[in-house]
Image: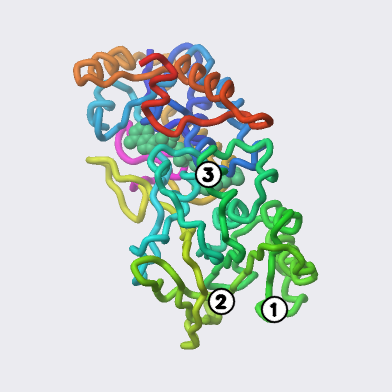
Amino acid sequence: MRHFAIVGSGPAGFYTAEALEKAYGEKARVDILDRYPVPYGLIRFGVAPDHQSLKAVSKRYDKVAESAGVDFIGNVTIGRDVSVAELLELYDAVILATGAPHDRKLGIPGEELAGVVGSAEFVGWYNGHPDFADLDPPLGSTHAAVVGNGNVALDCARILAKNHHEFEGSDIVGHALEALDQSAIRTITILGRRGPHQIAMTPKELGELGHLEAAVPVVDLADFPPVEADEPLEPGLRKSVTLLRGFADLPPDKPKRMVFDFFAKPLRIEGDGKAERIVVEKTELDEKGSARGTGETYEVPASLVITAIGYSTSPIPDVPFEGGKFVNEGGRIADRLYAVGWARRGPTGTIGTNRPDGYEVADQVAAAMPSGTAGDRAGAEGLKRLLQSRGVMPTDYDDWRKIEETETARARPGSPREKFVRPEEWLQAIGR
Ligand SMILES: Cc1cc2nc3c(=O)[nH]c(=O)nc-3n(C[C@H](O)[C@H](O)[C@H](O)COP(=O)(O)OP(=O)(O)OC[C@H]3O[C@@H](n4cnc5c(N)ncnc54)[C@H](O)[C@@H]3O)c2cc1C
């Protein structure tokens, strides 16, 4: 019997488990470990609460967790409760699927001011991540800014722009909904260092902005190249740019505005003890398509500044780490140690992009240890003994189902669940 440990229960972890299950059947046991008793990583804590159809992918992961050869072991932090070296003693292979939970920094003066938050913090706050339950973002002034031109920036801007009842059917947590109800924000400026042709926003997410009840997206057509220049763009990007151009025709007849400010490079954030404005330099594209400052500066008022410019992985002791992710070649870090998902390739791609990653690494594992060859590692039994000796109480998949049932039972009408946002509440729900 082979024993495999996957560290992290987000999409990458689950696709890898699915692939290992298919490759080994009953000849292996696959344990998916997570620091939290609740699985699915960014499906729970990242994907926007008003995009429930995307979150439904977790049903597929449920099937994997329920299959005979796979177990979910929650409430265990690798690198703190147990080391990677210890896991390698207990398991034939260890696959790190720990994602990329930390915000990249802008690296400009004023970033430390109150009111400047990373998108992981802001998204975690409205999605019930325990680390950000107390974030309390300042929503009392009229102006906010989001720095970044990807879908995460759009998520943050849209959440700030929506009305109470536009959250019907979502699982936004109660504390965020209450705070947003009181929000005074009327202008949300979305800052991008380059132009409309360089965005990383997809048509579905952009299209939604044209149909918000209380907010209108605003663009300046002077930022766009001539329309013929859209022709050679990749079809998805062309569609996004066409949608952006179309925003210029929308009547500005709604109380909130989402202003796309292109060719705008933040230089510093200023304010008296808290963010009040961003000083921005106008840019242009150089020969290589990078942003080059023009020397012309202006101010964008913003008491809340959300930076959405990418993420990095958490290092784990003794695992080589560089450039915000684990050092790996095609997913292999070292003998019997692998990485998948965002921990492997950095924070890019959709949920589905993690599937080929997981399958590729599972193929490598199966090639190194063909199904049917013997292994003599202790697996989950050894891990649980070790954890017990350290006073760590792991949770299992049934515990998660209990937490989920309790969250479902306490949901507001029309909402699928009201998430617990504190670890002690999760443990209470399972009688600990
Ligand atoms: C704000 C946001 C919105 C997004 N929206 C979409 C979308 O609409 N559509 C789409 O296709 N994609 C979206 N994505 C991208 C998608 O979420 C990612 O592609 C995917 O979640 C990456 O999967 P992962 O398994 O690598 O990491 P994650 O999903 O981050 O999972 C990592 C897991 O590892 C666990 N972990 C971390 N460290 C440890 C440790 N030391 N010990 C134990 N466990 C640990 C974490 O608790 C977590 O469960 C979004 C991403 C973000 C940030």
**Sequence-wise first label, 1 or 2:** 1
On the question of residue 368 being in view, the answer is: no
Please identify, in this view, whether the residue under mark 1 or under mark 3 is nearer the observer: 3
30, above or below 158, in the image: above
Q: Residue furthest bottom?
A: 295
Residue 328 among magenta residues: yes
Closer to us: 133 or 316: 133
- Other-residue count near label 3 (Cα within 10 Å), few / some / many at <14 / 14–19 / ≥20: some
**Sequence-wise first label, 3 or 2:** 3
Instruction: Describe residue 360's horizontal placement relative to residue 239 as left or right.
Output: left
Residue 310 placement (x, y as % from top left)? 46, 56
At label 1, which amino acid type do we have? Pro
104, above or below 40, in the image: below
Instruction: Describe residue 259's horizontal placement relative to residue 68 as left or right.
Output: right
| Picture quarter with the N terminus | top left
Q: What secondary structure is marked by label 1?
A: loop
Q: What secondary structure is marked by label 3?
A: helix
- Please report the bounds of the magenta region as a residue range: 326-343
Residue beneath disc 3: 176
Residue beneath disc 1: 225
**Sequence-wise first label, 1 or 3:** 3
Residue 311 placement (x, y as % from top left)? 43, 53
Distance from disc 1 to disc 2, alpha carbons, whole Å, reads 12 Å
Q: What is the quadrant of residue 379 in the picture?
A: top left
All told, the count of numbered labels is 3
Residue 89 placement (x, y as % from top left)? 24, 23
The residue at the point 51 percent across, 72 percent down is: 301
Distance from disc 3 to disc 2, alpha carbons, whole Å, reads 32 Å
The residue at the point 49 percent across, 21 percent down is: 403
